[in-house]
């Protein structure tokens, strides 16, 4: 039986209380950034050089995005971050007191590299922590969607290593109505902060390339995603429409061997 995240709940992912403040802030930042590019009369050569440098920053933080209605971090009901077992690399199975189910789908390995934006993205953020979560191949979110409220799969936390990296073993997420295929993530200053569900450094989303989605969704179990994806584009998605280049994962692999998705996350 195909499960889909509830339409009435997904309205939160389409610009209501969760989304409008974040998107409004991002658009205001872009407007202010654009205003800074207006040339000033009578600038010296030094001023021109400084202005040029300001126009082309070497690094910028990952865009802030909505956590959506299914974060599981205590901000909307249940808090999975305080449960024993949430710190893990393989997030395909439920853990703890859950129903013990396993999310099925095309294998996916996700590696996020957290770096320091203030240092020009050249310094890894060792000892930070990343919490990731996403829907299953049928578009359902554990803990929230009817039929999987007793599951907590496709959620997990890890501490970044010396390279600032965390790697999660998962399955390729489905595409549900109204949203481009994506993975949510929160960055914390430390593992202690993450498991206490406090002091979030950054909240954002990772997007997938269309050609990879098309290939994956042609396989068993992803039938609903084919129609949903056909009605969407990255340029029109309510989260990624104002710029997705820094959130588009580099994806390699195949359906048989599985895929790897990588993204650098400046914070």
Image (tube, rainbow, N blue to C red):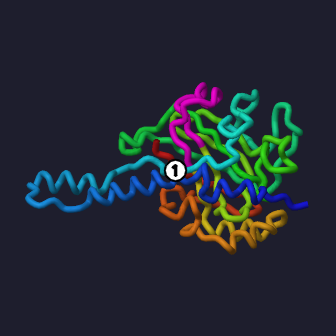
Question: Viewed as shown, does residue 12 lie left or right of 123?
Answer: right
Q: Which residue is mark 1?
A: 22
Instruction: Name the quadrant containing residue 149.
Output: top right
Q: Residue at x 79, y 67 (%)?
A: 224
Q: Residue at x 50, y 46 (%)?
A: 265
Q: How many marks?
A: 1
The residue segment tinted magenta is: 186-204
Q: Residue at x 14, y 52 (%)?
A: 47
Q: Residue at x 74, y 36 (%)?
A: 78
Residue 58 visible (yes or no) = yes
Q: Nearer the viewer, residue 8 or 143?
A: 8
Above or below, comparing residue 197 to residue 76 in the picture: above
Question: Viewed as shown, does residue 57 lie left or right of 179?
Answer: left
Hey, which residue is sitting farthest right in the picture?
Answer: 1
Residue 137 visible (yes or no) = no
Q: Residue 196: x, y in percent? A: 63, 26
Which corner quadrant holds the N terminus? bottom right
Instruction: Name the quadrant containing residue 194.
Output: top right
Above or below, comparing residue 15 to residue 211 in the picture: above
Q: Residue 245: x, y in percent? A: 49, 61
Secondary structure under the numbered disc 1 in the rendered image: helix
Q: Nearer the viewer, residue 172 or 180?
A: 180
* Residue 68 drawn in magenta: no
Above or below, comparing residue 49 to residue 224 in the picture: above
Crowding at label 1, few (<14), some or many (≥20) Cα neighbours within 10 Å? some
Q: Residue 75: x, y in percent? A: 65, 37
Instruction: Name the quadrant containing residue 45.
Output: bottom left
Question: Viewed as shown, does residue 132 lie left or right of 188?
Answer: right
Q: Residue 244: x, y in percent? A: 51, 61
């Amino acid at each position: 039986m195909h499960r889909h995240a509830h339409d009435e709940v997904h309205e939160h992912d389409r610009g209501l209380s969760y989304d409008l403040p974040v998107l409004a802030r991002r658009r205001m930042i872009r407007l202010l950034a654009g205003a800074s590019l207006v040339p000033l009369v009578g600038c010296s050569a030094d001023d021109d050089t400084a202005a040029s440098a300001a126009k082309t920053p070497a690094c910028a933080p990952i865009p802030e995005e909505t956590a959506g209605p299914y974060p599981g971090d205590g901000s909307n009901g249940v808090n999975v971050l305080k449960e024993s077992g949430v710190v893990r690399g393989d997030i395909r199975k439920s853990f703890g007191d859950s129903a013990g189910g396993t999310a099925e789908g095309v294998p996916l390995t996700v590696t996020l590299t957290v770096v320091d934006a203030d240092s020009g993205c050249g310094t890894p953020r060792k000892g930070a922590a990343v919490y990731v979560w996403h829907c299953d191949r049928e578009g359902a979110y554990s803990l929230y969607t009817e039929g999987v409220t007793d599951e907590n799969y496709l959620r997990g936390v890890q501490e970044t290593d010396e390279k600032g990296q965390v790697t999660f073993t998962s399955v390729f997420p489905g595409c549900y109505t109204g949203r481009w295929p994506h993975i949510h993530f929160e960055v914390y200053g430390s593992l202690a902060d993450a498991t206490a569900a406090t002091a979030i450094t950054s909240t954002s989303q990772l997007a997938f390339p269309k050609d990879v989605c098309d290939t994956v969704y042609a396989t068993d179990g992803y039938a609903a995603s084919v129609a949903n994806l056909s009605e969407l584009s990255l340029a029109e998605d309510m989260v990624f429409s104002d710029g997705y280049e820094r959130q588009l994962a580099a994806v390699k692999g195949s359906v048989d061997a599985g895929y790897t998705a990588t993204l650098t996350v400046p914070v």
